Amino acid sequence: MAKEKIIVIGGGIGGLTAGALLAQDGYRVTVLEASREWGGCAGKFERGDYLFASGATLGMGLERGGIHERIFRHLGLKAEAVKLDEVMKIRNGDRTLTFHADRTKHVNELQKQFPDYAKQIKSFYQDIYDIAARIRLLMKKLPALPLRSIRETIELLGALKAEHVKLTPGFLKTVHSLLRRHSLQTCKGFISFIDGQLIDSMQTTSKDCALLMGALALDIYHEGAYYVKGGLYQFANLLVKAAQKNGAEMVLGRRVLNVKKQNGKLEVTDHRGKVRIADHVICNTPVQSLPSILEDEIYNQLSLPVKRKSGEKTWGTMTLYLSLKDDQIPDDFPLFQQLSEPGSVSHDEGSHLFLSISQTGDMLRAPEGSRTMTVSTHIDLKQWETKEQYDINKELYSDKMMSLIQYYYPWIREALIELYPGAPRAWERFTFRPFGMVGGFPQTRSHSLFLSLSHRTPVKNLWLCGDSIFPGGGTIGVSVSGYHCFHSISGRKLIQ
């Protein structure tokens, strides 16, 4: 007998993960993606001969036992990637830091940069690495939070060890509290470094970042950081091929307008008026999209946290996409780096940039003799609401971001071939994210772990995944939420 019919709304990494796993298990899967590209915020776009990573660029979770490695191995896939010994450079005024993959080298580097705090930095990272190791041991079983079923409770209890009791006090603390414990609150340069790592992964800084999630974020690059040839859209391509191989229907350019109940099933209508009937629907969309696509009868049944957060705006991003002449770029130019405005304590609004550039010879992204670069900064979407604000900000931020790059790399203008600004409406137009929101909710104590949003809903056979859902953003986070949908529907687990 054929298994149940599944419709996945949204072809980002989370939805593709759920769809590929369910298709392999024999379910009749259809994935509907509103845009013309797979991958969502880890997708791509092309301009002429150049291919640009639209958002996420740094690969993680590909080490043995990492979530992507486990999912790909389960599906019989392999991603081609190069592990980085030096993850990124961090530049702030006259100071340049190297983020080493090796934990000992990393701590030694920071001690050299901040010699007056060397002892405190060592003890701080001892705590960070100890907390992260305990969490990884717990997360190896991929428990789902917050607990919404007896099975989830049993699985969490089965993953717990005696040593996890030591994590309990951390539920109430922030990264800042650990900095204070180690007398590092006055080391502004070190805090700026920590905040730079957290804003790009946890969507918040040490002052508000939940300690347990923050510790995992500060440790995760040491587990494995990778350059993926072509870009992270390759993850999406692999998942699409795996799903198709197992009979899934993969449809681009189909924006879902309505989901409603019909005779015990779920009825999904797209913008072309095509109606599909499913036993299960997985919404791989920001929760802010739910009010517009779920019929009132369904939306009103959702939990209060989901309904409350569906009305909250998160960060947006201003992004620059550059094509560059390779012969103008120094040989030691980092593949990944963060740049901060000298003297600024801000980690948003163009004062803090994340840069990624294609590797020389990566012909998937640029023709011979050239390379492509993606540059992004966090922005407050409230400042982009009117057309006048929007037009002014788009030009202002483009100039500010290019000026900051030029401050550190004066050759950038001469190397520039083309520049394409990506403001919030570009994200809204091409990835259909409401208002251009990206990254999910900041991992503060009120948004993380037991206070995060579950992949389960009170509506029978309606599921959620993506960067709004536990455990949060990034390709790692959304893949875990996609796996949870697969596990809850099928009862199956990933191979170890």
Image (spheres, helix red, strand yellow):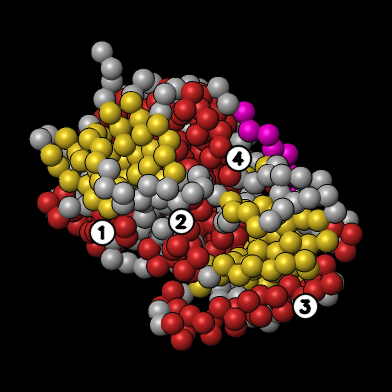
Q: CA distance from mark 2 to mark 1?
A: 16 Å
Q: What amino acid is labelled 4 in the image? A: Gln
Residue at the image point whose x is 62% and y is 28% from the top: 78
| Coordinates of residue 406 in the picture (x, y in percent) | 77, 75
Of 489 and 87, which appears nearest the observer?
489
Judge from the rendering whether residue 182 lies leftward or rightward of residue 227; answer left or right. left
- Amino acid type shown at disc 2: Thr
- Front-most of 311 and 206? 311
Query: Dot 1 surroundings within 10 Å: few (below 14), some, or many (20 or more)?
Result: few
Residue that badge 3 annotates: 407
CA gap, disc 2 to disc 4?
17 Å
Q: Nearer the viewer, residue 371 or 333?
A: 371
Report crowding for label 2: few under 14, some 14 to 19, many 20 or more residues within 10 A (C-alpha): many
x and y percentages locating residue 35 in the rendered image: 45, 51
Badge 1 amino acid: Ser
Residue 462 visible to an observer of this rendering? no
Residue indicated by mark 4: 234
Q: Which segment is the magenta one?
A: 78-88
**Nearer-N-terminus badge (2/1):** 1
Callout 1: SS = helix
Q: Residue at x 65, y 63 (%)?
A: 321
* Within-10-Å neighbours for mark 3: few <14, some 14–19, many 20+: some
Q: Which residue is mark 1?
A: 292
Splitting the image into 4 quarters, where does residue 462 fall?
A: top left
Distance of mark 4 from mark 3, alpha carbons? 33 Å
Label of residue 212 in the image? none
Name the mark nearer the viewer: 2 or 3: 2
Q: Which residue is mark 2?
A: 431
User: What secondary structure is found at the residue carrying circle 2?
Assistant: helix
